[in-house]
């Protein structure tokens, strides 16, 4: 949730055919790191790094946000890339599983 003194995140949309740009305020978020248009043109897939977690959300054209994926303790960002037909979303997920082996007398 956003504290009253924090600023709400916005997406600025510039129409390519001319006209004035408009801002879409993203409900529930104060910062964003990147975005990709959804294949249907009705929103964006947006990601951010918030504290110890990396988050992937969908934002519609009215600024309503929907949590899609959150990965705790992630050292890097995640992001999503929609398929051309709009039926799938590929996303990066980091894993830092480590194994340590000690060999003696080798």
Image: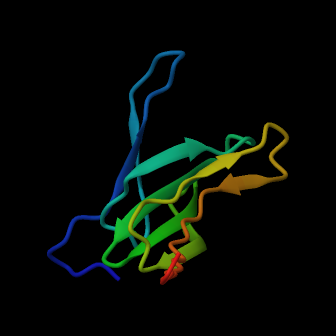
Who's the residue at 49% across and 69% down the image? 55
Q: How many numbered marks have been drawn onto this rendered protein structure?
A: 0
Can you say whether 91 is above or below 16 in the image?
A: below
Q: Does residue 52 appear anywhere in the picture?
A: yes
Across and down, in percent, residue 69 comes to 60, 72
In the drawing, does residue 45 fall left or right of residue 26? right
Across and down, in percent, residue 50 comes to 34, 72
Who's the residue at 49% across and 47% down the image? 35
Across and down, in percent, residue 47 comes to 47, 58
Viewer-nearest residue: 90 or 28 = 90
Q: Quadrant of residue 37?
A: top right
Q: Quadrant of residue 1?
A: bottom left
In the drawing, does residue 78 fall left or right of residue 42? left
Identify the residue at the far top of this view. 17
Viewer-nearest residue: 35 or 4 = 35
In the drawing, does residue 87 fall left or right of residue 17? right
Identify the residue at the far front of this view. 105
Who's the residue at 29% across and 78% down the image? 2
Q: Does residue 61 appear anywhere in the picture?
A: no
Q: Quadrant of residue 60?
A: bottom right
Colour mapping = rainbow
Across and down, in percent, residue 38 comes to 67, 45
Can you say whether 8 is above or below 1 in the image?
A: above
Viewer-nearest residue: 102 or 20 = 102
Viewer-nearest residue: 26 or 48 = 48
């Amino acid at each position: 949730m956003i504290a009253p003194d924090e600023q709400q995140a916005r997406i600025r949309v510039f129409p390519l055919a001319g006209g004035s740009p408009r801002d879409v305020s993203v409900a529930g978020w104060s910062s964003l790191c990147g975005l990709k248009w959804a294949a249907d043109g009705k929103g964006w897939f947006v990601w951010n790094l918030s504290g110890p977690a990396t988050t992937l959300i969908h934002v519609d054209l009215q600024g309503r946000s929907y949590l899609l994926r959150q990965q705790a303790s992630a050292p890097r960002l995640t992001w999503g890339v929609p398929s051309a037909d709009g039926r799938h979303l590929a996303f990066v997920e980091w894993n830092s599983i480590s194994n340590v082996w000690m060999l003696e007398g080798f």
